[in-house]
Amino acid sequence: MSGGVAVRANLLCVTWSAAQGHVFLFDIEARERVSAWSMPTGSTGYSDAAGVAMDENFHLYVADPHNQRVRHFSVFGRHLGDFGRALPATGDVGRDRAGVLEHPRAVAVHGRTLVVAGGERPRRFAVQRFDRSGNALTPLHSGGDPEAEFSAPHAVYADSAGILVADTLAGCVQRFRPDGAFVASVPCAPRGHLARPTAVVRRADGSLLLVDRGDDHGLRAVGADGRALPVPGDLPARCRDVVALAVDETSRLYVLDHHGERVVRFDTELAFDDVLVDLAEHLDDYEPGRSDS
């Protein structure tokens, strides 16, 4: 499933896909949509919209796994450029290089650095880093080993405490310092259970909340050391078919669920707050390919 959610101040961004990727921007204080647009299409005429991040200037960075790019937009939907080098026309070795994005699914931004994760098979360079100008920086190394491979990571999260990578097929979350140095690998399920983390955020107490599509399908909470924790608040009862997670500056949680069509907000204790967005209410008056900003 594609789709993503990002929030900063009063602006909430939701991405959604149907033949083309679509970006919706909402003012959650005014309770209204302020902008919507379609992603640029590639040579095939199609695009996708997966993970999304928003910087302090409200610029948006949207992963397009179909076209192997992260698209950069202004808050008004103007396409400002792309991140990622093109895939080689043939051969496999050139797909696993610094700066090359292969099926990017997740993006995070912190400070001047953009972190992008993705892939459909094990790759050494599945988690890339760029500066805001699009220059490739040193990628993250799985387990701190430059020769080790990530296993198709589907989610990445970054804050002042560091970077989290949901290493999906490996069934763990890898923790890194803000400078990219490896810290630890956090298992996402008890021994003997198959875990497939596809979304992750860090809570204010340092624990991790993630979406697991493995044996114990659903939302899961773990400590930074991998200890299984109870999922607090109203989350289990209120959320269904979760796609993505985000937190705001006050540590409130935003859950993109219903297969990517609804955003539900929870307070800092993860008690239910409000249903903020239902995309079904916005698709009839939205014309793909045109920004309504």
Image (cartoon, rainbow, N blue to C red):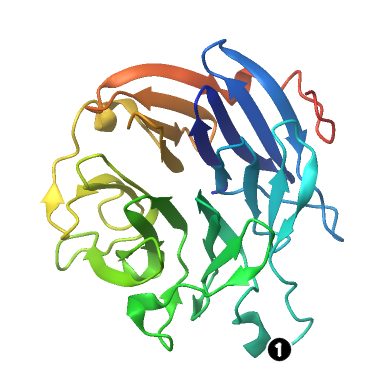
Left or right for 21, reference 98: right
Left or right for 16, reference 45: left
Q: Nearer the viewer, residue 8 or 87?
A: 8
Can residue 139 be seen here? yes
Left or right for 124, reference 217: right
- Count of numbered badges drawn on the protein: 1
Residue at the (14%, 41%) spot, across then down: 230
Quadrant where the C terminus lies?
A: top right
Residue 137 found in image quarter:
bottom right
Residue at the (76%, 18%) spot, across then down: 285
Secondary structure category for the residue under label 1: loop
Picture layout, residue 277 above or below residue 73:
above
Q: Nearer the viewer, residue 73 or 153?
A: 73
Residue at the (63%, 39%) spot, across then down: 16
Residue 67 pos. (x, y %): 73, 61
Picture layout, residue 127 above or below residue 273:
below
Q: Nearer the viewer, residue 83 or 33?
A: 83
Q: Amino acid at mark 1?
A: Gly
Residue 143 pos. (x, y %): 33, 77
Picture layout, residue 279 above or below residue 116:
above
Residue located beneath label 1 in the image: 91
Can residue 92 be seen here? no
Residue 106 pos. (x, y %): 53, 55
